[in-house]
Amino acid sequence: MRNSLQSGSRLEMAKREVDQCIVRALGKLGESTSEVIFYHLETRFGITTKDASTDSIRLGWGLQGIFGKATPYVIDLILDEANSVKSPSEGLLHFARGLKTYREAHFPNVSPSSPKRGEPYV
């Protein structure tokens, strides 16, 4: 029973870590802008904050519905935030890999917009 409690708390910690990266990244666009983005993700695409932190593919799809061709730049903001975490959880690494894969699959000819810090996105 103790292991299941520990894994549950690790999962919650990873979700919070992903949530924080998404909020910080979209916050760089402005507080009111990030609120509008979250509103449209939920109302237009049915993607709640919980969904965004657990399903990188759905988040990418929703962002693409909002930003169109500018989506890779918004994804890069989120990936940069993930890269800035000093000791990322396995959940954050998994989320970032999924979002990076979405970006590469849907926008193969767009180079990353931000400078790399050491290694490419987690």
Image: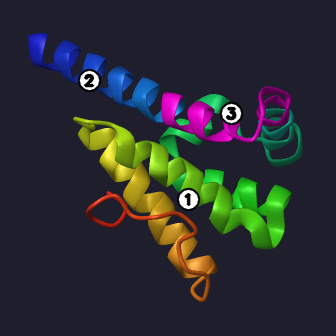
Q: Quickly name the residue at label 3.
A: 27
Mark 3 near mark 2, Cβ–Cβ under 8 Å?
Answer: no
Task: Specify the quadrant of the image occupied by residue 29.
Answer: top right
Residue 1 visible, this angle: no
Q: Main secondary structure of the magenta part?
A: helix
Q: Secondary structure at mark 1?
A: helix
Measure the alpha-carbon separation of dots 1 and 2.
25 Å
State yes or no: residue 16 in magenta. no
Vertical placement of residue 100 versus 47, above or below: below
Q: Quickly name the residue at label 2.
A: 10
**How many neighbours does mark 1 have within 10 angstroms: few (below 14), some (14-19), or many (20 or more)?**
many
Which one is earlier in the sequence, the residue at label 1 or at label 2? 2
**Residue at (21%, 13%) from the top-left corner?**
5
In the figure, is residue 121 to the left or right of 42?
A: left
Closer to us: 2 or 51: 51
Which one is earlier in the sequence, the residue at label 3 or at label 2? 2
Rendering coords of residue 28 (x, y %) = 67, 38
Between disc 3 and disc 2, the foreground one is: 3
Vertical placement of residue 49 versus 110, above or below: above
Rendering coords of residue 92 (x, y %) = 36, 42
Q: Quickly name the residue at label 1.
A: 76
**Kind of residue at disc 2:** Arg
Between disc 1 and disc 2, the foreground one is: 1
Measure the alpha-carbon separation of dots 3 and 2.
25 Å
Residue 7: mark in rendering? none
In the image, which residues are magenta?
20-35
Q: How many marks?
A: 3
In the figure, is residue 40 to the left or right of 74?
A: right
